[in-house]
Image (spheres, rainbow, N blue to C red):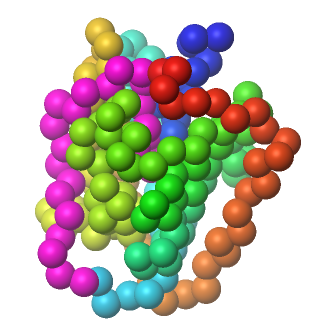
Amino acid sequence: MRQHNTLFIRLAIAATAVVLSACGVKKQAVAVQPKEEQPTWHTCLMQGAHATVKAGDDRYSASVTMQTVRDSMIVISVMPVLSMEMARLEATPGQLIAIDKIHSRYLVTTFDELNLAITPDMSWKTLQQIASGELPTGSEKARLVYTAADKTVEIEITYPARKTDVPVKMNRLRTDRYTKIDISKF
């Protein structure tokens, strides 16, 4: 069961590009820092992004769709096989919901709780930059490296062309069919 929890957290990071990882994760290096200037777009759609997560000898790859309504909501869908959503991250400036559809469970947390449990300086602005492809480096790739217990977790996201100011579907997933898990247990 512990192995399934770790996989769920790693896949959630790939989804957020971002963001969640294995239990006891401490950040080693992050290539993304929030920009000070405001973006000029209101909505952003990144379809067909590719995320790869390497943890020790394990490697996970998936297609990722990221939808952002600036300063309001982000939905990141992880689809490793045949466009079937396997994991999802829904974020607002005050809350993160990570949903593991494979194991029928979900996690609700805040950035403050997440920073205590996983990454010390993940913020809403950083997540919004990752999900919208507005990287300070101007790169088409984002690379994050974490230390998770005795393993190094590397996350690499390759971005497609982004679409801005287009309609995005921000339907929240119903969590009543999933089991809620507590971040403090990680």
- Residue at (71%, 68%) from the top-left corner? 171
- Residue at (58%, 30%) from the top-left corner? 182
* Quarter of image, res 131: bottom left
Task: Please state which of residues 166 and 113 is positioned toward the viewer in this rendering.
Answer: 113
Residue 153 image position (x, y, % from top left) = 32, 26
Q: Is residue 165 above or below residue 14?
A: below
- The answer to whether residue 102 shows anywhere in this view is no
Q: Is residue 67 above or below residue 183?
A: below
* The magenta stretch spans residue 49: no
Q: Is residue 80 above or below residue 126?
A: above
Residue 172 image position (x, y, % from top left) = 70, 63
Position of residue 142 in the picture relative to residue 180 (left or right): left
Q: Residue furthest right?
A: 177
* Quarter of image, res 25: top left
Position of residue 169 in the picture relative to residue 45 (left or right): right
- The answer to whether residue 158 shows anywhere in this view is yes
Residue 43 image position (x, y, % from top left) = 48, 82
Q: Main secondary structure of the magenta part?
A: loop
Q: Which range is magenta?
A: 13-38
* Quarter of image, res 21: top left
* The magenta stretch spans residue 18: yes
| Quadrant containing the N terminus in the rendered view | top right
Position of residue 55 in the picture relative to residue 137 (left or right): right
How many marks overall?
0
- Residue at (42%, 21%) from the top-left corner? 23
Task: Please state which of residues 151 and 158 is positioned toward the viewer in this rendering.
Answer: 151
- Residue at (32%, 40%) from the top-left corner? 115
Residue 91 image position (x, y, % from top left) = 51, 59
